[in-house]
Image (cartoon, grey):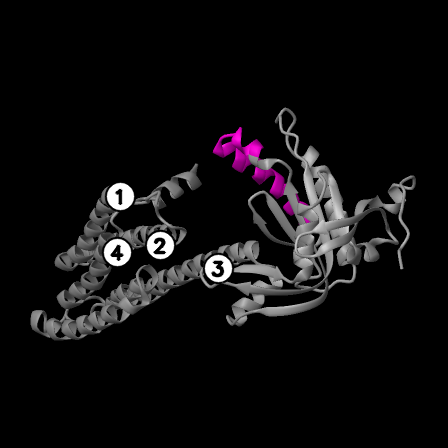
């Protein structure tokens, strides 16, 4: 209950359209204002007790102004107004108290609170705005020194113990609030960085994301041995025409999410999706000798997943065409606004052709892949397939792992 109440209070002025960063900054400033309010009220009470009634009004005026700005912010959601109001209040109120007490010593350095004005500009606005606010802080300190000599040249006659106590309180409390601000802001920055890195890892392979962060220049690699897989949903266009937009997106989301889990299990890389087509690769960006084996096992599970991953009663019989080819590829990151890790080369083209020229519910592979799988998998020769741009190409059908299908027919290598 307490956590819910605190979350509700910190959400004062929240707007559903806020970005994560804007929401964090709003919550942080509201929290900081609420933390300072009781200190301001206590400050005024202590000065009232020692007979400095006029001085007591300055922190109470700050508390009143801060509370009003919170109410206005809650109603208008105008963060610029709220931020500026808080900065002006924290800049002026301690300076007025210092002037009315007759100097920095008598005020126990309370003007240190005014330093939160430029600090707030760094945390809640843009760093470039901090310097004007810092200049205002310096000007306020200098003006305070001059006015305190004019308004109360003799200074307030306060008990020495009281002055020393306030020296300690101002230093400790200002330091505490500053640390609270910095630690919270740093944690928020780390959380935001973690979100950015997580999103980046959803777009790029981990190795590539790390390289891109350390070196923003173009990334281009050549791999002598890799395997590429394309999987396409059979007759998806007529199926999508019978469904509404939500059902289409939901169906693909469930299917591709299941494929993503398989990709993680086999430690291969999802490259991209294009409509209802799913592309994966093994051997990039990290080389591995079993790249063909990993994709073959992935393809077999993807085929079964398409039949079984949708809930019972969905009314959709999904079948896949899958193509795999192995060989050299070129890999790299293209684009600057939206990064894309992509692959190019004849191996990629052949894998795509194996899928598009394939048969529903079958996995069609090229000779290069077959030679890598022949010892561990059951395969069947399809024969020569007329591939666009390549002519007649010898292809095989991947049936399954040898140990699990001993009765299946297996072709011999052709020399």
Vertical position of residue 379 compared to residue 228: above or below: above
Vertical position of residue 405 compared to residue 389: above or below: above
Q: Which residue is mark 1?
A: 74
Tell whether label 2 touches label 3 (CB within 8 Å).
no
Percent position (x, y) of residue 303? 72, 40
Q: Which residue is mark 2?
A: 25
Mark 3 and mark 4 lie on one chain; the one further toward the N terminus is: 4
Q: Residue at x 49, y 30 (%)?
A: 244
Q: Residues within 10 Å of mark 4 (few under 14, many from 20)?
A: many
Helix, strand or loop under label 1? helix
The span shown in magenta is 238-265
Mark 1 and mark 4 lie on one chain; the one further toward the N terminus is: 1
Helix, strand or loop under label 3? helix
Mark 2 and mark 1 lie on one chain; the one further toward the N terminus is: 2
* Front label number (3 vs 2): 3
Which of the numbered marks, if any, corresponds to residue 4?
A: none
Q: Which residue is mark 4?
A: 83
Q: 313 or 359, which is in the foreground?
A: 359
Helix, strand or loop under label 4? helix
Q: Residues within 10 Å of mark 2 (few under 14, many from 20)?
A: some
Is 260 covered by the magenta stretch? yes
* Front label number (1 vs 3): 3
Q: Residue at x 23, y 41 (%)?
A: 75
Q: Residue at x 72, y 40 (%)?
A: 359
Q: Which residue is mark 3?
A: 193
Helix, strand or loop under label 2? helix
Tell whether label 3 touches label 1 (CB within 8 Å).
no
């Amino acid at each position: 209950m307490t956590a819910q109440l605190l979350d509700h209070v910190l959400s004062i002025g929240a707007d559903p359209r806020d970005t994560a960063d804007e929401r964090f900054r709003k919550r942080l400033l509201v929290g900081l204002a609420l933390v300072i309010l009781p200190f301001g009220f206590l400050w005024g009470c202590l000065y009232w007790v020692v007979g400095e009634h006029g001085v007591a009004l300055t922190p109470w005026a700050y508390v009143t102004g801060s509370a009003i700005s919170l109410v206005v912010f809650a109603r208008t959601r105008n963060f610029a107004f709220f931020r500026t109001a808080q900065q002006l209040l924290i800049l002026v109120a301690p300076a007025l108290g210092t002037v009315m007490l007759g100097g920095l010593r008598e005020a126990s350095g309370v003007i240190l609170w005014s330093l939160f004005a430029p600090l707030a500009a760094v945390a809640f606005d843009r760093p470039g705005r901090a310097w004007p606010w810092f200049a205002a802080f310096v000007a306020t300190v200098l003006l305070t020194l001059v006015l305190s000599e004019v308004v109360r040249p003799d200074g307030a006659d306060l008990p020495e113990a009281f002055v020393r106590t306030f020296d300690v309180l101002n230093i400790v409390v200002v330091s505490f609030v500053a640390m609270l601000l910095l630690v919270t802001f740093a944690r928020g920055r780390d959380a935001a960085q973690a979100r950015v890195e997580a999103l980046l890892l959803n777009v790029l392979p981990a190795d590539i994301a790390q390289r891109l962060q350390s070196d923003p220049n173009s990334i281009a690699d050549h791999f002598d041995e890799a395997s590429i897989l394309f999987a396409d949903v059979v007759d998806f266009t007529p199926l999508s025409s019978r469904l509404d937009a939500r059902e289409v997106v939901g169906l693909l989301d469930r299917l591709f999410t299941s494929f993503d889990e398989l990709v993680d299990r086999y430690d291969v890389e999802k490259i991209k999706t294009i409509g209802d087509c799913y592309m994966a690769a093994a051997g990039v960006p990290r080389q591995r000798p079993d790249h063909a084996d990993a994709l073959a096992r992935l393809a077999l599970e993807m085929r079964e997943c398409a039949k079984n991953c949708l809930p019972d009663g969905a009314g959709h019989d999904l079948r896949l065409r899958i193509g795999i080819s192995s060989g050299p590829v070129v890999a790299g990151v293209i684009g600057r606004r939206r990064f894309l890790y992509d692959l190019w080369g004849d191996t990629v083209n052949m894998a795509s052709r194996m899928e598009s020229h394939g048969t529903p519910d079958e996995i069609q592979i090229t000779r290069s892949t077959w030679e890598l799988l022949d010892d561990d998998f059951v395969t069947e020769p399809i024969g020569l397939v007329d591939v666009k741009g390549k002519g007649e190409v010898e292809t095989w059908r991947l049936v399954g792992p040898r140990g699990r299908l001993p009765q299946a027919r297996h072709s011999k290598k052709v020399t």
